[in-house]
Image (spheres, grey):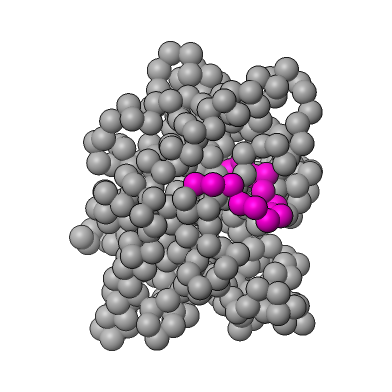
Amino acid sequence: MPQDFATRTDAVVAHSLDVIVSSQHESGAFPAALNYAVYDYCWFRDGSFIADSISRFGRIDNANRFHQWCAAIIDSRSTQITDLTRRGLSGEPIPGDEMLPTRYTLTGANGTEDWWDYQLDGYGTWLWALNEHLQRHKLSPEPYRAAIDLMVGYLAAFGDHPCFDWWEEHQNQRHISTLAAISGGLGAAAAMTSGLASDTAAAASMRLSDLALTSTAATGHLTKWIGTDAVDGSLIAASVPFGLVKPGDTTAEATYDKIITTIVNEGVYRYRGDTFYGGGEWINLTAWLGWYEVSTGRIDLAEKRRAWITEHATPSGDLPEQVSTRMQHPSRLEEWQHRWGPVATPLLWSHAMFLTLNNAIKNAQGQQ
């Protein structure tokens, strides 16, 4: 890597850390984006990956504060969660609008406007990220015990139910990346708790993993949801970090190859046919692809992903949600700009995954 480009990459890394840390609300929550009204909320999914990225960089206090915010939200809704879990286990149909939401205000309240809210992956992702943080820094799970146990019951009861996917779409499907996040989170919970909760978490994790892997029967690769042959950029997370399939194994490689051939230009599209802001290439998914490539020894390809992301940072180092130079449906850009404004920039999830990719590359190269 030329020296001037390496310097630019280091500058974007430093800026990414600064954007994340300086944006953290006093409550501990991370807004999804700055200067973008509909993202002035904290998603458990986005926030967990954001907290994990800075935990890797030793920002222990900032990560602690986020995890404490999540636990406080869960603890404060213990009666609701316990009741939902009881009703779910009894087989009672429960409307999505009665379930826990996917995003909260920065002070931990439910949002008041309509949203595609019933998503389960964020709660599994939080359990995974919490366990990673605690193990990485040798911290005790005891302060989080009640929240962990509540989530184990909730996800064991509802983890195999249809819900909106990462992109707040297709609410009637069972999405493989969602199942992977829940299975991975429950596996992490089994290690953080004990007794019946640990046993419940381990059993549910295995059950959901087996369910998710049924998607490979007809195709040989993971699919966007059960019953389709299409792929989605989020499927990389099923391997790294959630471990549904081991990086480099036959299914993981078949999924990687399918993603490369159908939804990768230089950056990664969410999925074929995406029209959101014209359907551009996503920063976080490109970093994710590089993370997988590091895990399978393709360091040169991972460096190219990092370089592409660096090239698309603004002069100040901000990273957008997506890059609009090679959209799938350019005619659809204007309607979203009119509805919500320009593409969200900076998006904290983009910065987080760039940090995670950079950290993975440096670790693979034996650098500090």
Residue sitting nearer the eye, 92 or 50 = 92
Kindly identify the residue that appears in the image at 48 percent across and 13 percent down: 196
Asked if residue 338 can be seen in this view, the reply is: yes
Of residues 203 and 316, the one nearer the viewer is: 316
The correct choice, above or below, for 154 with respect to 232 in the image is: above
Q: Quadrant of residue 324?
A: bottom right
- Residue 27 location in percent, x, y? 39, 50
Residue 25 falls in image quadrant = bottom left
Q: Which of these two is toward me, 137 or 327?
A: 137
Query: Which of the two residues, 204 or 65, is positioned nearer the viewer here?
Result: 65
Percent of width and height locating residue 340: 65, 73
| Left or right of 145 on screen, residue 243 | right
Q: Is residue 117 magenta?
A: yes
Can residue 134 be found in the magenta stretch? no
- Residue farthest to the left, as pictured: 368
At 70% from the left edge and 22% from the top edge, which residue is drawn? 87
Locate residue 233: give its quadrant: bottom right
Identify the image quadrant of the N terminus.
bottom left
Magenta extent: 108-121
Quadrant holding the C terminus: bottom left
Q: Residue at x 75, y 47 (%)?
A: 171
Which residue is found at the position 22% from the left and 61% from the top? 367
Is residue 253 visible to the viewer in this orientation of the structure? no
Q: Position of residue 45 (x, y in %)?
A: 52, 49
How far across and down, in percent of the image, does residue 102 sit?
60, 47
Query: What secondary structure is the stretch in magenta mostly built from?
Result: loop
Q: Judge whether 175 appears above or below 358 on screen.
A: above
